[in-house]
């Protein structure tokens, strides 16, 4: 599998969508994760950039994901595409 360099994380109440690309922009991973699987998933990845829509729960998730060495960048909701 190619090295994931950037992940877009769409958070919700129970199911999270993960979209990861490599340095050339090729989609490497698309996956749905349940809340209980989220930290397990990021713990097993090499450190990368994670983009996440800024909201109340995003800051909590960002702190937990940052603890695994990832760089988390909150994105204003107006810039996030559905």
Image: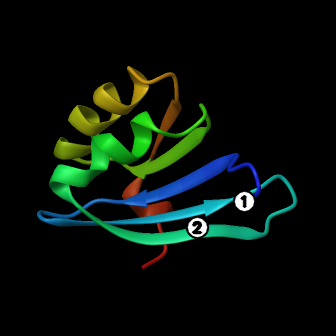
Task: Spot the residue most to the left.
Answer: 13
- Give the SS element for disc 1: loop
Q: Residue at x 60, y 34 (%)?
A: 46
**Residue that carries the numbered disc 2 in the rendered image:** 29
Q: Earlier in the sequence, mark 2 or mark 1?
A: 1
Instruction: State yes or no: discs 2 and 1 in contact (Cβ < 8 Å).
Output: yes
Q: Is residue 80 left or right of residue 25?
A: left
Q: Residue at x 42, y 57 (%)?
A: 9
Where residue 38 sits: x, y (%)? 29, 49
What colouring does the structure picture have?
Answer: rainbow
Counting the numbered discs, the total is 2
- Give the SS element for disc 2: strand
Where residue 25 sits: x, y (%)? 80, 64
Q: Is residue 21 left or right of residue 71?
A: right
Q: Which image quadrant for residue 64?
A: top left
Q: Which mark is residue 32?
A: none
Q: Is residue 18 above or below residue 35?
A: below
Q: Which mark is residue 1?
A: 1
Q: Is residue 50 above or below residue 2?
A: above
Task: Spot the residue most to the right.
Answer: 24
Q: Residues within 10 Å of mark 1 (few under 14, many from 20)?
A: few
């Amino acid at each position: 599998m190619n090295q994931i360099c950037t992940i877009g994380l769409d958070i919700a109440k129970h199911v999270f969508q993960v979209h990861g690309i490599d340095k050339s922009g090729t989609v490497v991973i698309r996956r749905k994760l349940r809340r209980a699987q989220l930290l397990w998933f990021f713990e097993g990845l090499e450190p990368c950039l994670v983009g996440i829509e800024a909201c109340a729960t995003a800051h909590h998730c960002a702190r937990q994901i940052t603890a695994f060495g990832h760089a988390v960048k909150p994105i204003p909701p107006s810039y996030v595409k559905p």
